[in-house]
Image (spheres, rainbow, N blue to C red):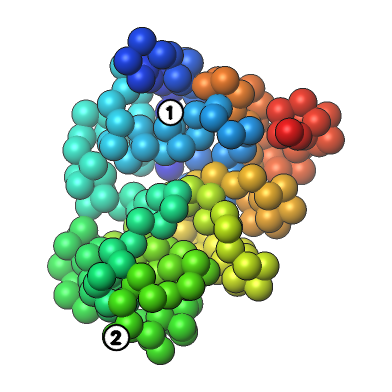
Amino acid sequence: MLNIHQLNQYYGQSHTLWDLDLIVPEGECTVLMGRNGVGKTTLLQCIMGLLPISSGDMLYQGEAIQKKAAEQRAVMGIGYVPQGRQIFPLLTVEENLQMGLPARKDGKKTIPELIYELFPVLRDMRARRGGDLSGGQQQQLAIGRALVTDPQLLILDEPTEGIQPNIVAEIGGIINRLNQEIGLTVLLVEQKLPFARHVADTFCILDRGRAVASGKIDALNQELVQQYLTV
């Protein structure tokens, strides 16, 4: 579904992503891993058009997207949940969810029932301001807002960061359901190894801006963990 080839990106004079290749197979969950500061979030922001790339190709469903604006990529079916959630704290839960509606191809103007089915707490709290929710509830709201756009590819940047364990388990179950039952393709940045192994089909490890290992999640062995993931 997503094929990235020889991607390079710079922050000023700093070369952050180096000739990076990444394949996200359709219908699977791919986890992007690596220590802090290796370029994971930078790569996601490049995919979403929030950061420019210097060279390389990005094909989404066979179509080049590297020159398309961020809002065009959303309309094409790429949903994004950024690190830190970035909900609108002064808007209600319902208003936050409605922010995703303009990106829908079908022009639907109401929040899909699936969102409230996946996250019942959002139905119960739809009149409350986003900033009044707990961290776990805000993360559910951020995922729900991305799903409102009706994406075919859902990109999640560390959705379990700072979240209580029971909500982490819920998010894992929802990712599995979206991926396995609904057929949504998922690209996930995740630091928690057990969570990654639970939800992912394939993995890619970044180190110093380069993709250094990839494959089926069963091939993520202790040697790779020790070399690239252990602090």
Q: Position of residue 62 (x, y in %)?
A: 34, 35
Q: Please identify the quarter of the rendering in which residue 123 is found.
A: bottom left
Q: Which residue is drawn at the image coordinates 31% and 77% (left, top)?
A: 129
Q: Which residue is drawn at the image coordinates 29% and 85% (left, top)?
A: 127
Where does the C terminus fall, quadrant-wise? top right
Q: Amino acid at mark 1?
A: Ile
Answer above or below: position of 137 versus 225. Answer: below
Tell whether 66 sits left or right of 5.
left
Seen as rendered, the residue at the extreme top is 13
Answer above or below: position of 37 versus 200. Answer: above
Q: CA distance from mark 1 to mark 2?
A: 41 Å
Q: Please identify the quarter of the rendering in which residue 138 is found.
A: bottom left
Name the residue carrying label 2.
127
Answer above or below: position of 180 versus 116. Answer: above
Q: In terms of secondary structure, where does tag 1 sit?
A: strand
Q: Which residue is drawn at the image coordinates 39% and 63% (left, top)?
A: 142
Q: Position of residue 152 (x, y in %)?
A: 38, 55
Q: Position of residue 108 (x, y in %)?
A: 19, 72
Mark positioned earlier in the residue sequence (1 or 2): 1
Q: Which residue is drawn at the image coordinates 43% and 32% (left, top)?
A: 43
Name the residue carrying label 1.
4
Tell whether 4 sits left or right of 209.
left
Q: Position of residue 2 (x, y in %)?
A: 42, 38
Q: Around disc 2, counting alpha carbons within 10 Å, would you say few (fewer than 14), some (14 to 19), or many (20 or more)?
A: few
Q: Amino acid at mark 2?
A: Ala
Whether residue 152 can be seen here = no
